[in-house]
Amino acid sequence: MLRLTAVSINHRTANVESREKIYYNSEEIGQISQTLRAVAREALIVSTCNRTELYLIPYHEPLTNSDIYSIISKGKKFVDGEFHAQYDTYEGFEAIRHLFTVATGADSLMVGDIQILGQMKDAYNVGVELGTVGTILHHASQVALKVGKRAKSETRISEGAVSVSYAAVELAQKIFGNLGGRTAMLIGAGETAELAAKDFKSKEIGTLIIANRTLERAGNLVAEMGFGEAIQLDSMPARLFSVDIVVSSVAGSDYVMTRDMVAAAMKGRPDRPLLVIDIGVPRNVDPNVRKVTNVFLNDMDSLNLIVEKNMQMRRSEIPAVNRLVDEELNDFIRWHNSLEVGPTIKMLRDKIEQLRLEEIARYKGRLNGTDQQVIDEVTKALVNKILHEPMTNLKAAENGIAMVDRVKLVKALFGLSEPADHLPGEPGSSSGKRR
């Protein structure tokens, strides 16, 4: 059995305000590392914008919810008791299952989120650097990263756009194919435009133009991207002639792109289509633009349909992801149970040896030096022969009895008890999740 407790404050248990309060950066994790080492053999903190999770292997007795709450709230400013009803707790191998599931993105706010893998790798590296990650959490983290990669490559859980900005870029790619020789224009330089700019860059767009009312802001985005050209919004109509894709996301009540503006730009390019994607709220583009020949206008409604369809597809992949998690969890359990064999064999040998020495000591006064040596050699050989087959069978994996059951049986038959400094994570509960 594995003595491991995991606490998770996430998008299902707490609102964004609460999640912000409990967020830990790497510096803050370092500040509480001494507290973690004082109560646990091993510890790992995973903290993102949508979750903060603490994985602990205590030295002896399992920690209470109050103990865990005290640790995870250390140095944070919020009302006492604020998180008492806002976290999930997992025990034993269910904590490992949860770690693996998180790594796949199946438990993310945005199902299939691929950023979580990088965030978990960072959390693991911080734990290693601080010395809070040991044998169990090292192996668990490595398998979590492995199953996350398997989920991405063997299922479709990370496929398809699930953000409006990426849906816009994906739509452009579906229409034009390779974007390398295309020109895209972003109208606006806010957060949505920034996301779209990054997505276009990742798709190797040929040319990127960012048009904004404030030229400086557009220039800052271009500088941050290290790519693109910044222009004033007033210059946008004149540049439409050379553009293949327009994505507009500015605030305002008036249309920034009218039918006449687009019709004028299209006169000199009758055989070259223009894709216009309006993700502004209120709308930035006159709906009559779609009446211009060879112009294709998409708005938030059409993009949201794409996003929802893709999200449904990702959710439908969760059972396949869970099968991968179960597969890796079973391997982890086998690996973990194998850790008990060595210490159990040592305890058995030590106990038999102690009995042998005690019996020899009882007859010591009746034996001369030569007899004592002979008896010592004979009893040692006898003990080795008696223990050889049981120990061989204990190590074997093909005898039809699970290793953990074999270990339990041997301990029960010979009355073996574990020392206080036994293997990390042993023994303990694997009862699952509690609230």
Image (cartoon, rainbow, N blue to C red):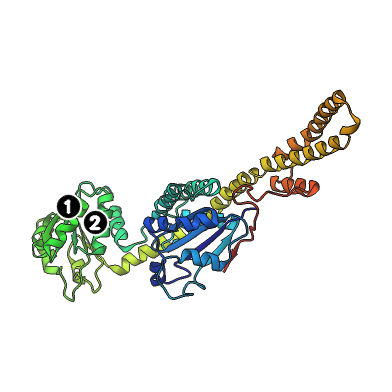
Query: Residue 98: x, y in percent?
Result: 53, 58
Which amino acid, mark 2?
Ala
Observer-nearest residue: 178 or 386? 386
The residue sitting at 56% across, 67% down in the picture is 65
Which amino acid, mark 1?
Gly
Residue 40 appears in which quarter of the rendering? bottom right
Left or right: 428, with 239 as reference point: right
Left or right: 345, with 150 as reference point: right
Q: Which residue is mark 2?
A: 197
Q: Which mark is residue 228?
A: 1
The residue sitting at 54% across, 45% down in the picture is 135
The number of discs equals: 2
- How far separated are the C-alphas under marks 1 and 2? 9 Å
**Residue contact between numbered discs 1 and 2, judged by CB atoms under 8 Å:** yes
Label 1 neighbour load within 10 Å: few <14, some 14-19, many 20+: many
Instruction: Using the image, determine if residue 257 lies above or below residue 360.
Output: below
Observer-nearest residue: 363 or 307? 363
Element on which disc 2 rests = helix
Q: Which mark is residue 378?
A: none
Residue 165 appears in which quarter of the rendering? bottom left
Label 2 neighbour load within 10 Å: few <14, some 14-19, many 20+: many
Q: Earlier in the sequence, mark 1 or mark 2?
A: 2
Instruction: Using the image, determine if residue 276 lies above or below residue 340.
Output: below
Element on which disc 1 rests = loop
Query: Residue 164: x, y in percent?
Result: 31, 63
Query: Residue 64: x, y in percent?
Result: 58, 65
